[in-house]
Image (cartoon, rainbow, N blue to C red):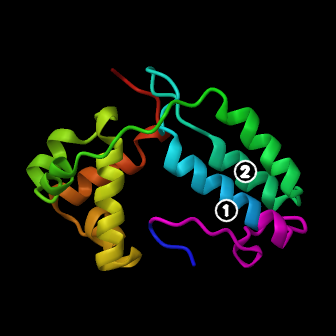
Amino acid sequence: MASPSTIKVSVKDVPVFSFNPKPETAEKASEVLQKDYEEHNIYFNDEGFHNHIDHHVLSIFALGASPEDVERSYAIDSKYQRPALPVDESIVKRLSSPDEFRKLAGKREHYPNFLQFFKQELEAKGVGQVVHDYIFAGGEFADDMLARFFAGMRPSID
């Protein structure tokens, strides 16, 4: 069963545009995505280019790839990934303070801490409540998060 810490792909959860996804490929996709999640950094270089293994694996799964296709894709894409950074539990605890959260938001080295924080939030509150609290609740904090949510959709003016 899928959880904030466990990836489980299913043929029941395919997107509208899919072509004959296979249960055995769902198993392989789950396996390699879990491995990627546990072993690789979200950024594969210092410029902030992010790991696209999940995009690639999920796309070819939905298009009917074989388990061997998924494994081959993972093997190619994982060659240039960097190892995952460790979680700092003391920082994860600090992220429950909106001031600390804002202070550390956007700093790449804190990605694993934010990931751990949100896993804990999802486990405690559920997806709907977390999305509401952090994106749609209104107010300065949620409005800032909503803007960050869409920040990659516009060119930088810096």
Residue 92 image offset from top left, x and y in percent: 21, 53
Residue shown at the point (77%, 74%) measured from the top left: 11
Residue shown at the point (67%, 68%) measured from the top left: 9
Q: Which mark is residue 30?
A: 1
Amino acid type at circle 1 is Ser
Q: Which mark is residue 97?
A: none
* Mark 1 Cα shell of 10 Å, populated few (<14), some (14-19), many (≥20): many
Quarter of the image for the N terminus: give it: bottom right
Tell me: 26 left or right of 40.
right
Residues at marks 1 and 2, CA–CA distance in whole angstroms: 9 Å
Tell me: 116 left or right of 103.
right
Disc 1 secondary structure class: helix
Verify whether residue 110 appears in magenta.
no
Amino acid type at circle 2 is Val
Q: Write down the residue under mark 2.
A: 57
Q: Note whether 22 is above or below 56 in the view shown.
A: below
Disc 2 secondary structure class: helix
Q: What secondary structure characterizes most of the magenta part?
A: loop
The magenta-colored residue range is 5-26
